[in-house]
Amino acid sequence: MNTVVDACQPPPAGIGVDEATKKVKNKDTDSVDSDDIMKEATVVSPVVSFRDKLLGEGSTHSAAISLEEEDEISIGEEDYTATVENGVPSITFSDRINGLLDKRMELCVIIKLLGRRITYNVLSNKLDGLWRTKQPFHLLTLENDYYMAKFQSKEDYVMVLSEGPWLVFGHCLTIQPWTPTFDTIEPYPMDVSTWIRLPGLPSRMYVHDALTAIGK
């Protein structure tokens, strides 16, 4: 049993001055060590994943990682069927996976410049100047001179589809929403959003069904 001794009071009988002083010093030392231990115990080292190590430790990659993780889809063995038909491997995904894949394309548009070929870098620079989107968009190269733009916000997506017309070097830039039936084998877009001016059209004709009939 330890005896607590006040340094300002004379030591109790049976305890020498040196012994009392030694115990006071030990008490102070123990309290400091305990505080240090408590402080060290509260310091928790951050857990760095293997992926973070590849990208480089730090918080600067957190936004990029979150964006990438939003596009990731977990596919299990129950989500697809792999077969071999006439010696040719074939794979069929479940409705759940097809639905998730389609959902990732909700903010994508298909682009093609009519009457002229254009390189990726030139088109990317032109679109940056034309659209001036509030958030960066991703431009991808497809086959047959098609491009696809993927937006991060619904507002930018609607703006690109609803405004216009968009002209690049005097040529019309066709823009259509991505659909599961889109195929780059088609030389021209099947559905195109475009502006049509009808001079002198009476204002009473500006109803959806009437304009649709005129457009056909």
Image: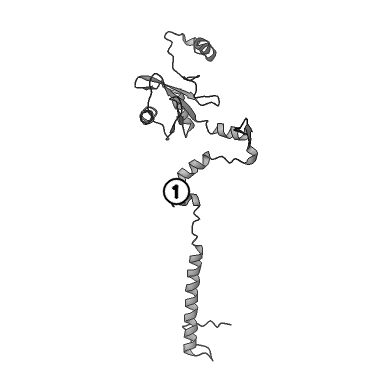
Dot 1: element: helix
Which colour scheme appears in the figure?
one colour
Between 206 and 146, the residue placed more toward the observer is 146
Against 133, is 200 above or below? Answer: above
Residue 4 in the image, given as x and y percentages of width and height: 53, 81
Q: How many marks?
A: 1
Against 181, is 50 above or below? Answer: below
Which residue is the extreme one toward the front? 87
Amino acid found under the numbered disc labelled 1: Leu
Which residue is the extreme one toward the right? 78
- Horizontal side of residue 76 vs 61, given as left or right: right
- Horizontal side of residue 130 vs 204, given as left or right: left
Q: Is residue 94 visible?
A: no
Which residue is the extreme one toward the left? 169
Q: How many other residues sit within 10 Å of disc 1, few (<14), some (14-19) or many (≥20)?
A: few
Against 27, is 171 above or below? Answer: above
Q: Which residue is drawn at 44% across and 47% down?
A: 61
Residue 63 in the image, given as x and y percentages of width and height: 46, 44
Q: Residue 87's image quarter?
A: top right
Q: Is residue 101 visible?
A: yes
Image quarter hosting the N terminus: bottom right
Check disc 1 and report the residue beneath it: 55
- Horizontal side of residue 100 vs 121, given as left or right: right
Q: Which residue is drawn at 50% across and 69% down?
A: 37
Residue 43 in the image, given as x and y percentages of width and height: 49, 62
Q: Which residue is drawn at 56% across and 31% down?
A: 102
Residue 148 in the image, given as x and y percentages of width and height: 46, 29
